[in-house]
């Protein structure tokens, strides 16, 4: 019995056939390809098997008759060398046959047969209508299906994907087996795409590869239907494995409909609805000539009988429940004698050493005192390594976040931990990075950093700095100096002001949190932080050219840089840093046609520092607010406006208030400018500017808003702000009344019966 599959996985066949094994499981294989320079290429793949997999059915049938069974495809490292796969952090399926899904002939066949996709076409041609055909006719039709799929592929394309090398290897195994003087037939089980070519391919095996024992792995791992389900986001899987498991077990489709009825009971699904859906499913199958209902027959029955309303509204929850039910939740089991990968053993040993129950199903809460207990810091680092690797085991629920800079005042960290069915599977997938959790986290960290270095010219230093903090949080202090050195290099290349400021904030966070993160081992950290500050100051005047879509982020970064300078000066006692910042702010503020929001923030900052006189600030604001009435041509396209009080004027005001909101009561000229502008608008102009005005004044606290209200009241002739008389009038009635009042005033003014309101 010769089966398509990596031939170095043949020793695992007895474990696949063991009574202790419960499907689904997967053969997991990795290959670390060493290159001359840089980090190694890391490749990984899975070979998932279910009870209804043809490969597993063949193994079981072979075992019943005493046949010798082996896999005959290339090993996974040989597939990589042959060109099958590029490096990928996510394992893909070796059973995925892309040619069967993307062939033009099959797409045309879908259209002609009325099939929704190649999966539905396969169901219609073979899964639901095969019982009436003889075995010979069935296999002939399947071979024709595979041959049709190959018509879109040239030899060059097949060679580039490693297909020809694989088929030659399988042909070599067939030739070897048929040359033996043995009784009985040689049964070959391969995919439909390969079947037409295997018998005619030239038998040949690739040259042996020199691979270190640690650079290749072939193991069994438990698998789950949620991982296998393509509709759940696993692109190399299959749709609805739970549905096909149900059919494989010979159970009626009505059981699935009944289960869906229970799952959607809260959506007012009645027993009559469930019966109608089951009847509709059977009738659709009969109408379409299916021996048994297909997956789409069932879904169409559900759509017609259980969805009460629009598919886009009421149908969303019902169809989501149907997809979940058809996907299934079965999780496999691997016998202990199949062996355990080193990283799984390390996970268990580390958990035992740290006092964490790694196989506990129920949730356990951990409270970690990071500042006073070294053993708690070790637990935190272990859990962060798992989280960084994407292993579903622990979740941080509270505590300081040293990467984002949030909740740093907290001294205690809280986690909830528990073992999940996919914990072990994800650990095994991470074995491509190393044999221990720490080794895997370090390799993944350096790979992520390398990806950031080649990602382009923008925002790379921000990524590197966050990885530096992540390294310290995970206790990877051996790798941290290298990450710091690369961060320093990227700072000088980063042309994005917000990115450099966030880099500076991350470095300062490490400086102020040296004890808990043990960042005191990072030599040169203060100097690199100063370098990041100087780079940000260098880029600061360029903010005058920021477009509208990026101005909010730039504004936040501008204000953050000023706070960061205070921290840097306190930590490093850097002389001249404040003067450098103020000098660059002056350059930004002096750009005559720059972004008004950021120019206003620069002006407000200079005023707060005593470097811009109150009178000058008032003049600048008055000029911007006045210019917004005509949107002068001198303003750049990003800040021009044809509406009164739009971005050009209120943007400058908003920037000033974000940087120094006390100017409203410290500089009378500011309030006077705003008052004059608003008084000059008609109602349409005011309503057009109102959203931006609200945004500009949103920085005020309730007490400051009240103070401003009293200032405005006194300026408009009111001695005090009396409480408003509230009436039971709806908002719609209020606006209708205002509209009647406006039209009446316009009519009276036009007829000379009412003077125009003063400006």
Image (cartoon, helix red, strand yellow):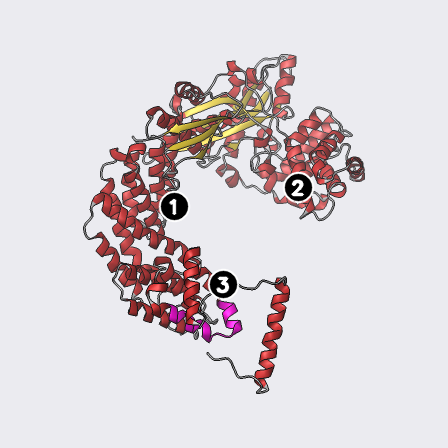
Answer yes or no: is residue 172 visible: no
**Residue occupying the point 49% across, 21% down:** 219
- Give the left or right position of residue 580, taking residue 324 as reference: left
Residue 581 placement (x, y as % from top left)? 26, 56
Q: Earlier in the sequence, mark 2 or mark 1?
A: 2
Q: Earlier in the sequence, mark 3 or mark 2?
A: 2
**Residue occupying the point 60% across, 75% down:** 741
Span colored in magenta: 671-689
Crowd around label 2: few <14 · some 14–19 · many ≥20 (10 Å)? some
Answer yes or no: is residue 338 visible: yes
Residue 50 placement (x, y as % from top left)? 61, 25
Residue 216 placement (x, y as % from top left)? 43, 25
User: Which residue is the site of mark 1?
Assistant: 455
Q: CA distance from mark 3 to mark 1?
A: 38 Å
- Mark number for residue 691? 3
- Quarter where residue 486 is shown: top left
Mark 2 vs mark 1: in front: 2
Chief secondary structure of the magenta portion = helix
- Mark number for residue 317? 2
Q: Earlier in the sequence, mark 3 or mark 1?
A: 1
- Give the left or right position of residue 616, taking residue 270 as reference: left
Q: CA distance from mark 2 to mark 1?
A: 39 Å
**Residue occupying the point 36% across, 50% down:** 458
Crowd around label 3: few <14 · some 14–19 · many ≥20 (10 Å)? few
């Amino acid at each position: 019995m010769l089966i398509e599959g990596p031939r170095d996985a043949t020793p695992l066949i007895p474990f696949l056939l063991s009574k202790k094994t419960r499907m689904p499981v997967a053969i997991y294989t990795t290959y670390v390809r060493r290159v001359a320079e840089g980090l190694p290429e890391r490749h990984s793949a899975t070979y998932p098997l279910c009870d209804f997999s043809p490969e597993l059915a063949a193994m079981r049938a072979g075992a019943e008759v005493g046949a010798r069974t082996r896999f005959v495809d290339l090993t996974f490292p040989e597939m990589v060398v042959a060109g099958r796969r590029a490096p990928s952090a996510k394992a893909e399926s070796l059973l995925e046959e892309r040619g069967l899904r993307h062939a033009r002939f099959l797409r045309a066949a879908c259209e002609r047969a009325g099939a929704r996709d190649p999966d539905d076409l396969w169901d219609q041609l073979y899964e639901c209508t095969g019982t009436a055909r003889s075995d010979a006719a069935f296999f002939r039709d399947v071979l024709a299906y595979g041959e049709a799929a190959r018509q879109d592929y040239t030899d060059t394309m097949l060679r580039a994907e490693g297909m020809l090398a694989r088929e030659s290897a399988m042909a070599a195994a067939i030739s070897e087996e048929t040359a033996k003087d043995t009784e009985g037939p040689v049964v070959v089980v391969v995919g439909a795409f390969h079947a037409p070519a295997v018998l005619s391919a030239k038998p040949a095996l690739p040259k042996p590869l020199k691979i270190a024992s640690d650079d290749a792995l072939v193991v069994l791992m438990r698998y789950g239907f949620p991982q296998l389900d393509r509709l759940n986001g696993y692109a190399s899987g299959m749709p609805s494995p739970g549905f096909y498991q149900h059919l494989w077990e010979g159970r009626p489709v009505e059981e699935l409909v009944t289960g869906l009825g229970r799952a959607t009971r809260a959506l007012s699904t009645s027993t009559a609805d469930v019966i109608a859906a089951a009847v509709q499913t059977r009738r659709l199958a009969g109408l379409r000539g299916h021996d048994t209902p297909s997956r789409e027959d069932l879904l169409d029955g559900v759509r017609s009988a259980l969805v009460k309303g629009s598919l886009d509204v009421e149908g969303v929850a019902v169809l989501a429940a149907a997809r979940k039910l058809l996907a299934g939740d079965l999780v496999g089991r691997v016998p202990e004698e199949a062996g355990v990968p080193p990283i799984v053993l390390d996970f268990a040993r580390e958990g035992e050493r740290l006092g964490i129950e790694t196989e506990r199903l129920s949730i356990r809460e951990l409270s970690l005192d990071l500042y006073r207990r070294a053993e708690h810091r070790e637990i935190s680092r272990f859990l962060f390594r798992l989280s960084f690797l994407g292993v579903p085991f622990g979740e941080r629920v509270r505590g300081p976040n040293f990467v984002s800079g949030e909740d740093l005042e907290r001294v205690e960290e809280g986690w909830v931990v528990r073992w999940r069915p996919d914990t072990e599977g994800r650990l095994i997938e991470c074995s491509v990075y190393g044999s221990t959790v720490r080794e895997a986290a370090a390799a993944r960290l350096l790979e992520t950093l390398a990806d950031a270095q080649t990602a382009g010219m923008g925002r790379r230093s921000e990524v590197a700095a966050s990885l530096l903090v992540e390294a310290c949080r995970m206790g990877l202090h051996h790798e941290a100096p290298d990450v710091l050195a690369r961060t320093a290099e990227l700072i000088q290349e980063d042309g994005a002001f917000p990115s450099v400021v966030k880099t500076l904030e991350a470095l300062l966070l490490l400086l102020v949190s040296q004890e808990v993160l043990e960042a005191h081992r990072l030599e040169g950290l203060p100097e690199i932080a100063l370098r990041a500050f100087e780079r940000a100051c260098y880029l600061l005047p360029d903010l005058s050219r920021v477009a509208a879509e990026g101005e909010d982020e730039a504004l936040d970064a501008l204000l953050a840089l000023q706070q960061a300078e205070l921290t840097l000066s306190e930590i490093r006692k850097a002389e001249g840093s404040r003067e450098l910042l103020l000098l660059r702010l002056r350059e930004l503020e002096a750009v005559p046609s720059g972004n008004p929001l950021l120019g206003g923030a620069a002006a407000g900052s200079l005023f707060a520092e005593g470097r811009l006189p109150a009178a000058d600030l008032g003049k600048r604001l008055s000029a911007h607010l006045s210019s917004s009435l005509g949107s002068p041509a001198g303003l750049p396209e990003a800040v021009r406006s044809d509406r009164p009080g739009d971005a050009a004027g209120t943007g400058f005001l908003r920037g000033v208030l974000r940087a120094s909101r006390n100017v409203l009561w410290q500089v009378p000229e500011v309030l006077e400018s705003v008052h004059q502008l608003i008084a000059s608008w008609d109602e349409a102009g005011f309503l057009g500017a109102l959203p931006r005005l609200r945004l500009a004044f949103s920085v005020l606290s309730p007490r400051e808003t009240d103070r401003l209200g009293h200032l405005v009241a006194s300026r408009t002739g009111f001695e005090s702000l009396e409480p408003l008389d509230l009436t039971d009038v709806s908002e719609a009635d209020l606006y209708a009344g205002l509209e009647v009042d406006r039209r009446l005033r316009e009519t009276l003014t036009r007829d000379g019966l009412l003077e125009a309101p003063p400006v």
